[in-house]
Image: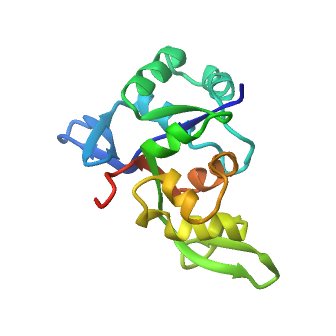
């Protein structure tokens, strides 16, 4: 069984409750705003992957990287975030259930095909491309927000769910996209 770990929700940044530096990190999860402490947020943020290392991301890699940081109990934090649906562990042999319960939302500007490599499509800021992808993934990334779930988006675009999930961490690590909860069909 091959599994990947994914963060669920969109980062909204730091919220300061008062002038005493009391703060939380806010994540939008569906229609809710969830507040995370700094250690919880560090674990959630790491689940996005690392932009400089596009390899697939799993629990073992996260735990190993977190062991080198000043985080009290990374395994307990991972379990807590999983139970709160802020993290999801996905079995790539059976990804349809996950894809039916979540959707992919684009967060950057699409740049289209790169002039030097016309088979590579990029997204990023107005000043700079930050991540490249195949035409199939780019097409899904462009239109996925119009589908109620990632599963339906993949079906509409004739994309393999497992292949999409395997290629997703570079988009998440660069904040080009986020995973969110699926919406009911016909909803928004």
Quadrant of the rendered image containing residue 96: top right
Q: Position of residue 163 (x, y in %)?
A: 70, 50
Q: Position of residue 28 (x, y in %)?
A: 32, 47
Residue 126 left/right relative to 146: right
Q: Position of residue 84 (x, y in %)?
A: 36, 28
The residue at 79%/75% (across/down) is 119
Q: Quadrant of the C terminus?
A: bottom left
From the viewer's perspective, is residue 6 above or below residue 39?
A: below
The residue at 29%/38% (across/down) is 34
Q: Residue furthest bottom?
A: 115
The residue at 67%/51% (across/down) is 51
From the viewer's perspective, is residue 49 above or below residue 67?
A: below
Q: Nearer the viewer, residue 158 or 81?
A: 158
Q: Nearer the viewer, residue 155 or 67?
A: 155
Q: Residue furthest left?
A: 18
The residue at 55%/38% (across/down) is 6
From the viewer's perspective, is residue 177 above or below residue 73?
A: below
Evaluate whether residue 176 shows in this view.
no
Residue 141 left/right relative to 24: right
């Amino acid at each position: 069984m091959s599994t990947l770990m994914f963060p669920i929700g969109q980062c909204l940044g730091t919220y300061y409750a008062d002038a005493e530096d009391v703060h939380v990190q806010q994540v939008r999860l569906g229609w809710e705003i969830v507040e995370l402490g700094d250690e919880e947020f560090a674990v959630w943020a790491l689940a996005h992957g690392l932009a400089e290392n596009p390899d697939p991301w799993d629990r073992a890699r996260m735990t190993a990287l977190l062991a080198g940081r000043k985080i009290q109990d990374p395994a307990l934090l991972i379990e807590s975030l999983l139970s709160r649906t802020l993290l999801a562990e996905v079995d790539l042999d059976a990804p349809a259930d996950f894809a039916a319960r979540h959707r992919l939302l684009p967060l950057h500007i699409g740049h289209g095909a790169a002039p030097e490599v016309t088979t590579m499509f990029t997204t990023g800021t107005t000043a700079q491309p930050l991540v490249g992808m195949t035409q199939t993934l780019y097409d899904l990334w462009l239109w996925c927000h119009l589908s109620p779930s990632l599963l339906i988006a993949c079906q509409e675009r004739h994309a393999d769910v497992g292949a999409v999930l395997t290629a997703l961490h570079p988009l998440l690590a660069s904040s080009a996209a986020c995973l969110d909860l699926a919406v009911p069909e016909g909803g928004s």
